[in-house]
Image (cartoon, coloured by chain):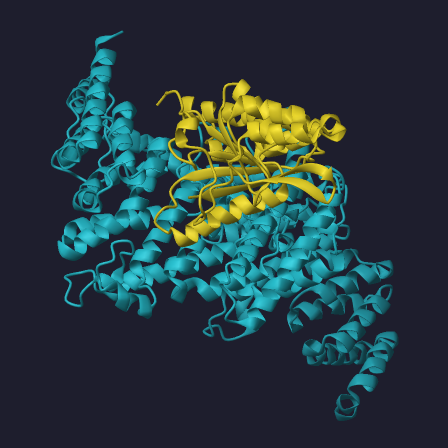
Amino acid sequence: MTESPAPLKFCTVCASNNNRSMEAHKVLQENGFIVRSYGTGSAVRLPGPTIDKPNVFPFGTPYTKIFEVLNSQDLKMHKVNGVIEMTKRNMQIKKAPERWPYLNQPPQRLDEEEHPGFDNDLDFQVVITCEERCFDAVVEDYFSRNYFEPNDTDHLVYCFNVDIRDDHESARMGGLAILELANMLKKANTEAAEDEDSMPLQDTIPDIIVEWQRKYPTLPILHALCYH
Amino acid sequence: MTSTEEQLKAQTHQLEEAAKLAFDNNEYFDQVLNTIVDISLSQPISNFTIQSKCLDFIYKAYYLKKIKSFDLRCKSSTKLIDMIARLILVGENDEAHHKLPKYRITERCIEILSVSYDLMFYKMINEPDKEQWSKLARLRDFIVSKWPSSYPLLPYNRDTDWSRSSSCKNAIVKFMGKVIQTHLPPPSSREKNNNNNNIDDISIAMVNKDHAFLYNSNIGTLGQALVDKLFAALNEEILIPTAAFSAMLSVLMTLFKTRPNIVSSKFLNFVLGYEAQLKRTPKFEKDKLKIKMNRRFNDRLDKIIISLLLNRGFINKDPSLKSRFENKLRYLVDKTSEQKKRNILEDSDEDEDEDGAEIQRLKKRRKLDNMEVAEEPVDFFNESKFPRAHDYRSIYSLLKPGDALEDFNMSSISPDMLSNMVITALSKVETRRLVKALSLVSDRYIEVVTRDDYENADEGEGEREAIPTDVAYDPTSANVKQEIGVKNEEDEEDGFNEEEAFSLPLPKALDINQKKQQMKAIINNFIKLASLDVKEQSDESSTGNDLGKVAISKWKSDSWIKILSRLVTRGTIANEEMSRYIREGIFNHFQTDIKDRLVSVIEWLNEEYYSETVKNEEPTVATADEAHNIYLEYTGKVLDALIPFLDTADRKIFIRLLSELPYLNKDLISRIKSICTDPVRSKLGFQSLLYLIMFRPPVFDDCISILKELYAEANEKNNEPLKAASLKLLSKYAPKEISES
């Protein structure tokens, strides 16, 4: 049974869907992956005039609007820490930061037309979060769905967390590491579909994780298999 | 493109068109499904392209719910039974002979069944069909029995198989969840509200008491058995791979909602008590990083579930339980933050060493708690009963594929060293382990042999028919059968008839002289061994090692007589003439230097005595003398051969002989008289009698009697020294006898 496998669809997740998830989103998209991204926090939080006064935006606020606000603050710090550049980059990728589609919560995301290649807001097989609490939130949401939607547990998702510090440079490095993980998964998926004698994809995941972790020892990984 | 390929392409195109029609216009679904099921049943299972296309359609309709209407899916659901059963329900023979369907087909079939089982059940409630239900039950039991093995991949061992074939394993566990939900009722409060019509929660609760076959206790028993199976696996000592662990938790979360009356308490206890560190590392998994990550991932999942239960208020009703969950969550949060501080690659043993004493204590305690559910330990990586190829290596190898040892050429070792290695290994191996290894090899042999028979018998079939169906037809099979027929004719022309069982001709019987000649050669060979220098080795047989009980675990200087004497007493027991011939051979060998060979003589005579004792255990034999005539005969001969050549310096060996001979009677002892009457060796004779009087009470009376005879003889011949020596012992051990005489 030799056939081209359906390509894996990816989702990158961080707290605010601004820095780490968007960097990974960009890198994966540039490399031909079908990808979308979310933030798991309650709102988008960016550095503000002082440490105790962050800039807080609701999810769905267009990046252009965020850019205007940041620009209007005319802070040196925004340029130094790369927030302005980051927002400019995000504007090239999608319109606005989106919130993870938590079960039974009002959606804070873009219309589905903004995401070609995806049938719905959870239509992906791989989720890569960039922080442990985001991983916990995503996996907990999937378990909640198993509980509250007992008849809809047929879609499998491979969840990973790659712990990345929330700064510009770490996000850049983390994005490359996530790209490598995505490439390894893609390769295993292709081999499993094209060659009946090769290992099924799920069986290869533990080895992929170990190999990847040895290469990126400073980015501790987490993994779980979820259904929705 | 060949015509077959073109034909295949056209067929798949037609299937795709049909599928599109059904999805675009649901009213055609039933009709299209009928056609697709018929096509699948009419095509050989080996036509993977067509079978996959057929399954794809059903997968989309049922698993991806492209057919949204419950009624449509339910109405047609039982049509899937024959098709799925034919694709994956293999007979024992097929399974044993690797005639399993492709991995993806199996996985798809299980997935489809897991979303249609309750629909089929529902349909059976309203439209009972006992025959179809029996087929479905067989299919269900077959699939469930495969969990948590590596099905449909060939097995290696239980530990390793936990992390193999995860997709099918997880598909089965989800199917088990569906069966549990269908076979066990929801809580009674919900049952009343359901009013027997809740299609979102189909279960046994909907079945009327007068149902032809569904209303019976087996349904509920199976559901409960699956719940138990699930928790038994979760509570196993082994560390379950994250993929399987995740899927099991996911199923339990669903059951926690739909069947809280059945799983709640077990589920909550499990979550509360889970500790990845206490789980046993799978045997043969050498990658510490992988294990360490497996532990961390599983603990993380446990933490997330606990957090979910607390956040959603699922355990608010029980404050004490809630506080236990809060404590566990705090513990896990602290633990993960500690782990985070360390580099994952460093201190690979950290997880195992962490809080060492406490972990060890917990491990011990839990081990005691779980004693009764201890799993059969895994001994070999490749414990498969089926060889992976048709060669000796595959039959004998218990190693991990790719292990460097597999390529080692044993024939490069000298036979001596090889036999030493084998003997050492056999003496040290745990019996249970050896038996298991031999059983595996034996199973594989049988499998290879029967596979040959099976394949020959099955060759013409070209098609596996687990469940006979009227529409099943393989147009190619007739041709194949014909070809086989032709082949058989050709074989017959060669004068070879496969049907006739071949048996080796019987060897020509030897006459007695030829037998004796052969036996002489055997005896001579053994006697030759007696003269060889054997390097003595320490006997290291460990306690509890049953192999240590064998007569010879290491070759020693006296091993030859052990074998030869057993050949006499046990090997040739049915042939008296031959055993007498061997006895004479042994005796003649000893006779040439009996003093130096006394140790071996003792060994031989003891064997003779033991053998006769065993042989004459029945109480029909009146006396010990009658029961041991061979022993007595040859002991007498040995004494007669030895005594004339003894001198006083031989005291030690002679007394050793007297002490180690298993049985003595007056006749044997009386042969000592000749030593006593010999003035030069008299002292040796009386010392021997003294020894017997003191240390062998059964012959006390015989010795006194002999002393009396000696005393009388001395009196008669006026032999003063003899008289004095006899009197000395008599006055000490039988003073009454002297006064009487």
Residue B555 position, x and y percent, is 68, 44
How many marks are shown on the rendered structure?
Answer: 0
Chain appearing in yellow on the rendered image: A
- Which of the 4 image quadrants contains residue B527? top right
Q: In the rendered image, which quarter contains the C terminus of chain A?
A: top left
Q: Is residue B353 above or below residue B481?
A: below
- Along the line of sight, the residue nearer the viewer: A135 or B222: A135
Q: In the rendered image, which quarter contains the N terminus of chain A?
A: top left
Residue B49 position, x and y percent, is 28, 23
Q: Is residue B719 above or below residue B74?
A: below
- Along the line of sight, the residue nearer the viewer: B163 or B720: B163
Q: Is residue B619 visible?
A: yes
Residue B422 position, x and y percent, is 63, 39
Tint applied to chain B in the drawing: cyan
Q: Is residue B741 above or below residue B114?
A: below
Left or right: B644 with respect to B108? right
Rendered residue at 79%/84% (across/down): B733
- Along the line of sight, the residue nearer the viewer: A161 or A186: A161
Q: Is residue B413 visible?
A: no
Residue A197 position, x and y percent, is 43, 26
Rendered residue at 50%/25% (across/down): A186
Rendered residue at 30%/45% (across/down): B115
Left or right: B654 with respect to B280? right
- Which of the 4 image quadrants contains residue B151? top left
Rendered residue at 24%/38% (across/down): B67
